[in-house]
Image (cartoon, helix red, strand yellow):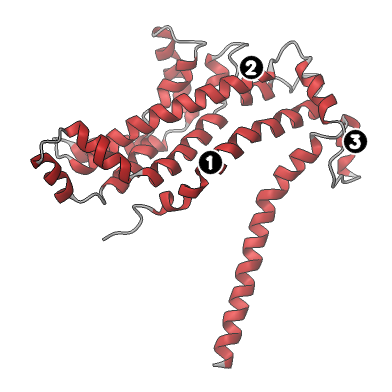
Amino acid sequence: MRKQTRDEAIWRFLGYTFVLLVTLLMVVPIYWIIVASTLPEQAFLSAGTDIQLFPGSNFFANLEALQARESVDFIQSIWNSVFIAIVYTLLSLVLCSMGGFAFAKYEFRFKEPIFYAILATLTLPIQLLVIPLFLLISQMGLTNSYWAIILPWAANPLGIFLMRQNMKQIPDALLESARIDGATEFQLYYRIALPTMKSSLAALAIVLFLFQWNLFLFPLVVLNQGKYTIPVAINELVGAQRVYYDQIMVAAALSIIPLFLVFLFLQRHFVSGILAGSVKE
């Protein structure tokens, strides 16, 4: 009995130590970005030999230098990223939930091959899709527009997969009862399926928002100056002759705020949404 208690204490200690290490690995880089954004450039460059642990007082000076740049309108790039990420997330949630509902609750020809073909697109790297998608967007006349970034990724295959797995949990008998009561197929989706998927939709919304927020290569190809998103705008601060580290750190620190707000708003549903569909009845 005493040996079992000692083993449990050791495993509990190892577990807490592992969680603490992982937390430090996640938090320290973010804290360092915030600290670096408040330091003068020289202090930032000397941080390799003289580690700065506490924030300085140069944040607004660095922000003013960032805003004074003619080649990058960073406030506009924040608005571009926020607008694109919100519209993309909402549109993708609708398409993914509809696709997941169809694959989970309807029978049609070639259902399984179509689903696995959609799933197989997850293996294609974005770099491989850039040129074909650019040609398609160009033929549609959508280059240098918000829709050029939103439409190609709107039907996210990972989202369809997650929604299909979660909507399989909706009892077929419940849908049949609603049909008998006169509900249309769209009402089954809108009034029965969606309300039961709130947690899963919230978790998927975070994943989709992060995906669009961090997208870099395709926006770099199809957008011109003035429509740049945050990753592309930050890349403009890396010049051939000089890297503006102080301005990069300010831009990176500000770019964290919308992500933090989205996660704070949806975190209550995130864990339950991720776990939904993982239990097989």
Residue 84, percent across and down? 51, 23
Amino acid beneath label 1: Phe
Q: Regarding mark 3 in the picture, which secondary structure is present there?
A: helix
Residue 72, percent across and down? 70, 15
Residue at left offset 64%, top offset 17%: 76
Residue 179 appears left or right of 117: left
What whole-number distance in Å separates the C-alpha atoms at marks 1 and 3?
Answer: 35 Å
Residue at left offset 43%, top offset 19%: 133
193 up-or-down from 5: above or below: above
Q: Residue furthest left?
A: 180
What whole-number distance in Å separates the C-alpha atoms at marks 2 and 1?
Answer: 24 Å
Residue at left offset 60%, top offset 33%: 258
224 up-or-down from 198: above or below: above
* Residue annotated with mark 1: 265
* Residue annotated with mark 3: 43
Q: Which mark is residue 76?
A: 2
> Circle 3: is it few (<14), some (14-19), or many (20+) Cα within 10 Å?
some
Residue 26 appears left or right of 107: right
What whole-number distance in Å separates the C-alpha atoms at marks 3 and 2?
Answer: 29 Å
Residue 166, percent across and down? 31, 48
Q: Regarding mark 2 in the picture, which secondary structure is present there?
A: helix
Q: Quadrant of residue 202?
A: top left
Residue 147, percent across and down? 45, 16
Q: Regarding mark 1 in the picture, which secondary structure is present there?
A: helix
